[in-house]
Amino acid sequence: MSTLGSAQRAQVVVDTSESRHARLRALPPGHVRLADGFWEPRRRINREETLPSQYEHIEATGRLDNFRRASGKVDVPFRGLYFNDSDVYKWLEAASWSLATDPDPGLERMVESAITEIADAQRPDGYLNTYFTFERAHERWTDFDLHEMYCAGHLIQAAVAHFRATGTRRLLDVAVRFANHICDRFGPEEQGKQPAIDGHEEIEMALVELFRATGERRYLEQAEFFVDARGHGLLGEPYGRFDPSYSQDHKPFREQDEVVGHAVRALYLYSGAADLHAETGEPDLLEALERLWRNMTTKRMYVSGGLGSRHEGEAFGEDYELPSGRAYAETCAAIASVMWNWRMLMISGDARYADLMEHTLYNAVLPGVSLDGRHYFYQNPLADDGTHRRRSWFGCACCPPNVARLLASLPGYFYGVSDDTMWVHLYAEGSATGNLGDRAVRLAQHTDYPRDGNVEIEVEGGGDFGLMLRVPSWCERGYTVEVNGEAVDSPLSSGSYAEIRRTWRTGDTVRLKLPTPVRFVECHPYVAENAGRVALMRGPLLYCVEQTDQPGLDPRDLVVPVGPEPSVRFEPGLLGGVTALTVRAEVVTPQPAWENRLYRTANAHPDDRRAETVELKAVPYYAWANREPGAMWVWLQSR
Amino acid sequence: MSTLGSAQRAQVVVDTSESRHARLRALPPGHVRLADGFWEPRRRINREETLPSQYEHIEATGRLDNFRRASGKVDVPFRGLYFNDSDVYKWLEAASWSLATDPDPGLERMVESAITEIADAQRPDGYLNTYFTFERAHERWTDFDLHEMYCAGHLIQAAVAHFRATGTRRLLDVAVRFANHICDRFGPEEQGKQPAIDGHEEIEMALVELFRATGERRYLEQAEFFVDARGHGLLGEPYGRFDPSYSQDHKPFREQDEVVGHAVRALYLYSGAADLHAETGEPDLLEALERLWRNMTTKRMYVSGGLGSRHEGEAFGEDYELPSGRAYAETCAAIASVMWNWRMLMISGDARYADLMEHTLYNAVLPGVSLDGRHYFYQNPLADDGTHRRRSWFGCACCPPNVARLLASLPGYFYGVSDDTMWVHLYAEGSATGNLGDRAVRLAQHTDYPRDGNVEIEVEGGGDFGLMLRVPSWCERGYTVEVNGEAVDSPLSSGSYAEIRRTWRTGDTVRLKLPTPVRFVECHPYVAENAGRVALMRGPLLYCVEQTDQPGLDPRDLVVPVGPEPSVRFEPGLLGGVTALTVRAEVVTPQPAWENRLYRTANAHPDDRRAETVELKAVPYYAWANREPGAMWVWLQSR
């Protein structure tokens, strides 16, 4: 247990408190209280519905029995996919973070019971994977596309979360033993080790966090080895039909400049590399990350923030390849994007990462789970004919517990701290306490965000310090910041932090006003299928049109003129309470000449499309597919 | 050998000479001579380059060794995919048809040698599949997604072709033994047999042809059993991630109304069902086929005639799901479409099937093979950035020998015969001899088609009979037909056959004039990414724009106004001789404001796109990617 001698217990999701090259530190979820009408109800459902029902699925689908089988407690066949262990670990991570903010003896019993099954299944040498047991034990570490390190990474993340949230080391001990097994075995040839990397990245960021939790430098070095070893052909081509870019193994990480391959793998790698940079400060790493971020956000990202254009390989597409109906946009990829942007934000304090994190949370992560907290999307298309519906579970169930762990830890993403400065990244009614040196500062936030953009922040605890308030990039004009009713004279700009540095007194109040007009958003003309179309946004929220709100209309026939301001109305009874938009549109149906034909000579037919004007109702995209099945459309024809 | 007692030897690709419910019969490839400047040079390359080089690939990749291994001649491991036998069979079918029109002792030796290897590998019980030998022999017929019947079907097709082309029964005997093995084993439970179907359709049409070649009714009944047995869950769900629609097993064939799943599987099934209808005349079968054809051609077909919108599952997409850059449009699917349309044409004599057959041959099959006859496309996108290039072979090498067998048998698709009528389906310089009853009629066709649309047909052999000349649907106006210089008074319409019925004398000459203006083709507005775009066509040919012809221009920036007639010039030295188009276009580049961004609020930026006028060169799509790599675009922005 000597490796735990210097174990830390910063109760945060990504602990940069000792990271020399990170500008910001996170606040523990337990030091942040969300009391808002948007996120907190979703978090309550996460605790009351999602976590218990997921535990039932995990039990019912044999995922826990796989551990019991490995420890000899039951004599049943292995069930499910070779990486099913990871779902248990992600659920444990989710439950741990939930316990950090909302103690729950029932949930705690489930957690402890799952940990017991896991601990009992560990081999004496530290190895732990229930698929590679008994008849498959001889196949351990023979095929690095079978997710052994990926599962190990999720075990480590769960263990770190459990340790940070509860202060107990039971699961951490298990993770440390497995991590040691991996560190002993894999590494540079010159150290007498086996050079290897995992097909599915994940362990890289887990090892950096294990280093942060335990103080053991070997885990950081191991993470660095795994990042550095990519792109040197170690994986060979074990992926069946996929080429090395599928696993970002096509070139060394520091040379990569386009986001390619399996989106979740890619984004987990980038998260791990960002963690590594926070510790080492190596400029090449950061430059590669910035290049990749630029390529992703300017060429390969859906308007929702969703990532991954292809079903084939669950992969990023080429530049500007962003089909709406066939968008893959896996929920896990959106979560991974939040993870990566969070790390980039901590490193840099650059508001563009917070912007994208917010945008992704509202519009790409949240659609992944139903309002009842018991149904999930794996893919998140931006147009649908009504057949794509959330399901209660999946054979490959990576997304459900991934959503759960993000919602459970969500308060930790709202605020940040640097030397003598409190940062407000996200807005929601509630409060937060941060430590600036040895002084605690409490901020009380009053707002209806995202229903409107007025935010009031009340300071408790005086003294000289800075306050950084994000002016979101979605708010393009008309924003103001006042302190105690007086305009702040520091320059403000959209997509940056407004810095207010002064001697504060308890009761000082900052008012941020962010106008929230409806925005007609257009897409780069190289995205062929979005040409001549608009998407609707208001505040941080992307909107969509659902068939159920406009019976008898085909969304494909709607043409929305840019200009007339849609009317805006909060409907408390609709979809858990949403601000709905009413948009004027024309209904333009294809000419009768198009009936039963797909192609024709242009201009050979008179243009007799008829147009009538209707009022369309648009609802937030995150809430789609929570009513009766029907078509959904984000990009509307425009003129 | 009693099953061969009544063996027929009509030298045609699909023999409907005795089919009671087919209106037309084919002419043997050997009775048709192509002497044109378009197809015959391709067929010569097929004989001189494609067939010999494919034999080398088949040998070099162990496909023949797999047979030698199965017969105990060599002691090597099985190589390649579990359905590699089928490539040998398809090559044999191609070579057989080539021998029917162009005897070649060298090719004949290769054929005989391959047949020896195949015959020697057959098991005593008739079973023949080199993958399921030795260590895998016990897995025979355990997983119907492993293409055992698919391979059997290709063996049968090759054997029928070889028998028809050469008159020898060596390969036919092998196929009959395997077919008997299958008929003995699989069928209705009430006959004490195992109800089963293959995951990959193919054997259905093969068995109907085997019935036609041998007169043995059991093969027809077996084909009917396989068609009828689909959609009753016999396959279970052995497809990993795919659902039953992947193999058209989602509902009984007669209830199907949308083309779904793996496109080649689907189209082979439809071909088999059409063959079945030609024999049985069952109306329900034909109605299902017509429904499927309508759905395919009006909702799910590329402007090239290519089929299959999804890489995932090599599958048809939803209605109007037709991405250009990510088109799958497998070469095999286009070939299968020709096969299906050919059968529908034989059943009905309806010109729309001949129209689509012609369109698909020029624009979807032909792009699948390079001008040098040694490189192949598997996927045929309609837009590309220059990275998609033909390859000399594939691990899954279904497409190359499929192209070869179609080109080898191509003359057989040009003409047809019904009771007292000769039909001209396709146009090319050459001649054909058909038997009307006991009278031979010879037609000499003089034309530069598709370079222009003037066709002269000279009749040899007098008497009363009809002549049906197709007026292609691509020719929308201005077409005329004259006999001996006098206008024909029968009503003419585009997309139908002009019927000329008279007492002919040798030397009578029919002149068909088909104007070939350049057509700007637009797409149904529900295909989102083609909205506001046009494709260029002239005569039967689809055009594209290649980067190499317009250095320095980005095809994505081109806007082609509909209206000004492009200039047309035949360039003998370009791409084997093509008619190139010169099209006026505007270059409209994205506003500078789009740099480094993917989305923005509409109308917030001034519209400062600059436009200059250029001349674009367009070349036939079938010839793309035969020069230096560069972007290619079919659908151009328009206004």
Image (cartoon, coloured by chain):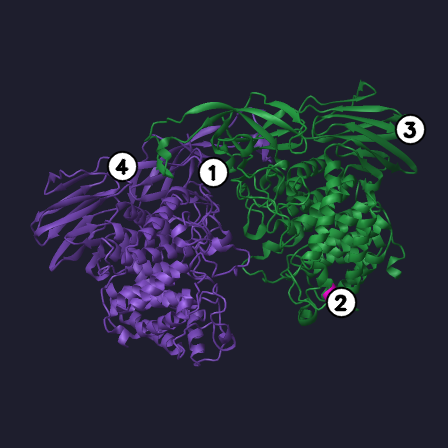
Chain colours: A green, B purple
Q: Which residue is mark 2?
A: A73
Q: Which residue is mark 1?
A: B529
Q: CA gap, disc 2 to disc 1?
A: 57 Å
Q: Tag 3, which chain?
A: A
**Residues at marks 2 and 4 touching, judged by CB atoms closer than 8 Å:** no
Question: Looking at the picture, do discs 4 and 3 lie on one chain?
Answer: no
Q: CA gap, disc 3 to disc 1?
A: 58 Å
Helix, strand or loop for disc 2: loop
On the rendered image, what quadrant is the N terminus of chain A found in? bottom right
Which of B347 and A601 lies nearest the eye of the viewer? B347
Q: Which residue is mark 4?
A: B476
Q: Check disc 1: other Cα within 10 Å, few if <14, some if 14-19, many if 20+.
A: many
Q: Position of residue B346 (x, y in %)?
A: 26, 53
Give the extent of the magenta segment.
Answer: A68-73
Q: CA gap, disc 2 to disc 4?
A: 77 Å
At x 33%, y 40%, the residue is B537
Q: Amino acid at mark 1?
A: Glu
Residue lying furthest top: A486
Nearer the observer: mark 2 or 4; the answer is 2
Q: CA gap, disc 1 to disc 4?
A: 26 Å
Residue lying furthest front: B190
